[in-house]
Image (spheres, helix red, strand yellow):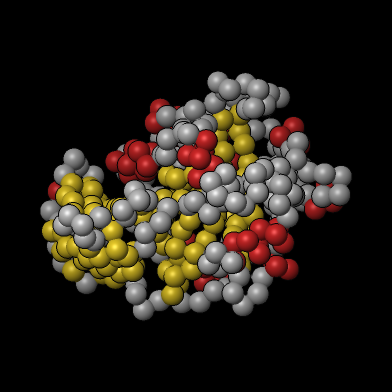
Amino acid sequence: MKILLDPNKKYFKANLHCHSTYSDGKASVETLKEEYKKRGYSIVAFTDHEFVVDNSRLDDDEFLTITSCEVAIKEFSNQSTLKNLHMRVCHLNFYALDQHNTLTPCYASVYNHFASEENKPLIRFDGEYERRYSTDGINEIIRIANERGFIVSYNHPTWSLENATDYLGYENLFAVEIYNHSCVHLGLLDDEHALDDFLRAGKKLFCTAADDNHNGKGFQAPYTDSFGGWVWINAEKLDYATIMNALQRGDFYASTGPQIFSLIQDGDVVKVQASPCRKISLSTKSRRAQTVFAEPNNTLDSAEFTLYPTDGYFRIRVVDEQGNTAYSQAYFLNE
């Protein structure tokens, strides 16, 4: 029996993509901590653009910051994605395995339009790097970031105007962001399709949901770009090493609402325990899929599925009555 999500461990709610006044966000890290904590979050990765900041001074017994940043690689490095709306771009989040590692990998000042004069002393780098928008160029950036102690996620491919012919060449990614609340809030589609593109191509990576919030309209619904996508990290305790180990192992799931309390593989049977929902689905590497539906005017909170040897991998989706979704990781049957 494999316990894939363990009900005997804690779940910590995390936003893994967040922008503050260190770059182009409109709220300070202090304000963001307060707003996220009051909504049940335990973890925020402040992924400000183009340089890594250690925000561990904000940590307490109930809140942890992940040292991180977001970098861009554009077709035309001197052009703005806000002006050239047809330019392809690749955005990557770097997450430091050591909380105090603030040496930004592959720093390129041509991309850093965000740091104020006050914040420029925070930037640490070991020389200018010329980023190349190509498969080889992006893979080199991922490789260097990995070597310097960061795991790397691939962000919002739909917003980036990238498709499978672009991103399936990327190697050594930790995760792909399948739900970006800021993008979906604008009206773009989510990126769940990209996860299966990677998986069916034999690339074993995890999925995240995140906000990518900038808070230009504050924190009040329905206009806020915060609190729409997150991950639940399944771990023993809230400390940096434990949380980063859980992320590296894939001991988490993505959500825009529902919760998955337990996920167990017992031989060829998958057992799911979840918050009240309208349906629970299993999908696989093939087109075989199965869904358990709630009865009319009712909800369900559990389901069981039988696996076939030809399934390759499976993953679980839980959808609530509002259409919000929880997404498990993909679990390969040969492991």
Q: In screen coordinates, is 49 left or right of 266?
A: right
- Residue plotted at (86% across, 49% down): 118
Q: Is residue 48 above or below residue 263?
A: above
Of residue 316 and residue 52, the one placed in the foreground of this image is 316
- Quadrant of residue 274 within the rendered picture: bottom left
Q: Give the total of numbered labels.
A: 0
Q: Is residue 162 above or below residue 106?
A: above
Seen in the picture, residue 242 relative to 193 is either above or below; the reply is below
Q: From the viewer's perspective, is residue 227 above or below residue 222?
A: below
Looking at this rendering, what residue extends furthest in the front direction?
297
Identify the residue at image location x=45%, y=45%.
Answer: 179
Q: Is residue 147 visible?
A: no
**Visible residue check, residue 205:** yes
The x, y position of residue 257, in whole percent, is: 40, 56
Work out which residue is located at the far right of the displayed protein and give it. Answer: 117
Where residue 276 sits in the image (x, y, percent)? 29, 63
The quarter of the image holding the C terminus is: bottom left
Depth check: 56 or 28 in front?
28
- For the N terminus, the quadrant is bottom left
- The residue nearer to you, when weighing 26 against 74, is 26
User: At x 21% / y 57%, what residue is drawn?
Assistant: 297
Percent of width and height locating residue 285: 23, 44
Q: Position of residue 307 (x, y in %)?
A: 15, 56
Q: Is residue 156 left or right of residue 148?
A: left
Please give the name of the residue rendered at 55% of the width and 64% of the height, measured from the top-left corner: 39
Q: In the visual, does 107 lie left or right of 247?
A: right
Q: 169 or 29: which is nearer to us?
A: 29
Going by the image, does 25 lie left or right of 203?
right
